[in-house]
Image (tube, helix red, strand yellow):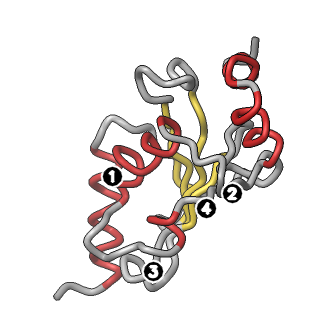
């Protein structure tokens, strides 16, 4: 079993070598921003967000802290803080997951399949359930 710090280094390196633009903060590898593009065939397609990632000392045994830095209208993202409500990051994280999973699976799934019954943004959840068309227009910034 490799040490958590070696695993963290390897995961960050894998992310940096992928197609994602990674911008380290304070010259370290425990905090960085990642450029994330909205998934194809979603309301967020064409959008680009900066995602702040903070890795705890116990990573990968403890989940990364992940949040949107620029605004996004979504039921499961707090509009002010950018915090994300996502079980796989908050409760059911496993060391089997890595940072690429966050950007290639978890965040795209979050944007493709919003869950208005567990909202961080009550306005977005309410609008999504009451008026899908108006919700879609607001997401697209129309």
The reply to whether dot 4 and dot 2 touch (C-beta < 8 Å) is no
Which residue is label 4 attached to?
26
| Residue 89 % position (x, y) | 49, 66
Which residue is label 2 attached to?
83
Point 71% across, 38% down: residue: 70
Disc 3, SS: loop
Q: Which mark is residue 13?
A: none
Q: Earlier in the sequence, mark 1 or mark 3?
A: 3
Q: Earlier in the sequence, mark 4 or mark 3?
A: 4
Q: CA distance from mark 4 to mark 3?
A: 22 Å
| Residue 21 % position (x, y) | 44, 38
In front here: 14 or 117?
117
* In this rendering, the label closer to the viewer, 4 or 2: 2
Q: Earlier in the sequence, mark 2 or mark 1?
A: 2
Disc 4, SS: loop
* In this rendering, the label closer to the viewer, 4 or 3: 3
Q: How many marks?
A: 4
In front here: 130 or 10?
130
Point 27% across, 65% down: residue: 10
Which residue is label 3 attached to?
62
129 displayed left or right of 17? right
In front here: 48 or 120?
120
The reply to whether dot 1 and dot 4 touch (C-beta < 8 Å) is no
Q: CA distance from mark 2 to mark 3?
A: 17 Å
Q: CA distance from mark 4 to mark 2?
A: 21 Å
Q: Quadrant where the N terminus lies?
A: bottom left
Which residue is label 1 attached to?
100
Which quarter of the picture shows residue 9?
bottom left
The crowd level at tag 3 (other Cα within 10 Å; few <14, some 14-19, many 20+) is some
């Amino acid at each position: 079993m490799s040490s958590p710090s070696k695993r963290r280094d390897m995961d960050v390196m894998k992310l940096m070598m992928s197609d994602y633009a990674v911008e380290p903060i304070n010259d370290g590898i425990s905090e960085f921003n990642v450029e994330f593009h909205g998934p194809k065939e979603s309301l967020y397609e064409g959008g680009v967000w900066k995602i702040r990632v903070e890795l705890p000392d116990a990573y990968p045994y403890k989940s990364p802290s992940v949040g949107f830095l620029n605004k996004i209208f979504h039921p499961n993202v707090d509009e002010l803080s950018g915090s994300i409500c996502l079980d796989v990051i908050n409760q059911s994280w496993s060391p089997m997951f890595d940072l690429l999973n966050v950007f290639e699976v978890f965040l795209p799934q979050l944007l493709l399949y919003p869950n208005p019954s567990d909202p961080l943004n009550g306005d977005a959840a309410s609008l999504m359930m009451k008026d899908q068309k108006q919700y879609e227009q607001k997401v697209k910034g129309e």
